[in-house]
Amino acid sequence: MTDATPSPNPEPDDRPALLIVDDDATFCSVLATAMTRRGFDSTCAHTVEQALACAETCTPEYAVIDLRLPGTSGLILVEKLRALDPGTRIVMLTGYASIATAVEAVKLGATHYLAKPVDVDEILAAFERTSGDAEVPISAHPLSVNRLEWEYIQRVLTENNGNVSVTARVLKMHRRTLQRKLTKYPAKT
């Protein structure tokens, strides 16, 4: 297993390969620059197809994947990268964090799941996490009703493989209403 904090100035061939997948080109560029300074050989992709093409030519040791990618979910990519190399350390990032997607990401093989915004140190720490933490503090405040609704919608959407029409029928909700709810950021806890 490769240490997530490479030496400060490794030889180009000794740097661990890092694949960054996000549809935000600016975010990818900034993160790639920061990770390259930390000793990684960083490559960016903006779609699942681009990421798979990169991974097939040079299997990454590390990957940072956004949950929402054009046309499909980053969860699909987590599964495919793990199939290519079960040793790849994957951190899932999202601005739309939900319990359902976090559980699915970890089940599919992600090492960790982080809600945006994140910094480089948080990503590096997530790469190094190999086990759970039984001492994690439990919140004294229950989730708000709006957050519970968001979590429930995300769980049903995940159960229906991201199909909005089927999810709307299951929730007995008009499709447009569901789409409007899905475009909003999750409610604060």
Image (cartoon, rainbow, N blue to C red):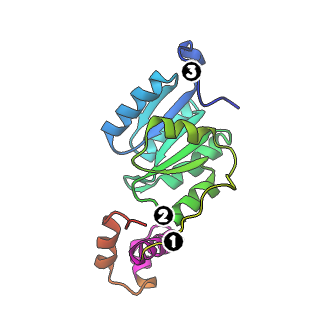
The residue positioned farthest toward the front in the image shown = 140
Q: Identify whether 101 is placed above or below 165.
A: above
In the picture, residue 182 is in which quadrant? bottom left
> What residue is shown at x 37% (from left), y 67% (from top)?
187
Mark 3, secondary structure of its residue: loop
Residue 52 visible in the displayed image: no
In space, the residues marked 3 and 2 are separated at their CA atoms by 33 Å
Residue contact at pointers 1 and 2, CB within 8 angstroms: yes
Q: Position of residue 78 (x, y in %)?
A: 56, 49
Q: Position of residue 29 (x, y in %)?
A: 35, 32
Residue 168 visible in the displayed image: yes
> What residue is shown at x 52% (from left), y 22% (from top)?
39
Q: Nearer the viewer, mark 3 or mark 2?
A: 2
Mark 1 crowd level (few <14, some 14–19, many ≥20, 10 Å Cα): many
Q: Position of residue 104 (x, y in %)?
A: 58, 60
In this rendering, the count of numbered labels is 3
Q: Amino acid at mark 2?
A: Ser
Q: Which residue lies under the disc numbered 3?
A: 15
Mark 1, secondary structure of its residue: helix
Q: Which residue lies under the disc numbered 2?
A: 98
In space, the residues marked 3 and 1 are separated at their CA atoms by 38 Å
Q: Position of residue 35 (x, y in %)?
A: 46, 28
Along the polypeptide, which appears first: circle 1 or circle 2?
2
Q: State the extent of the magenta-drawn residues as a range.
A: 145-168
Tell me, yes or no, whether the highlighted magenta stretch contains residue 151: yes
Q: Which residue lies under the disc numbered 1?
A: 155
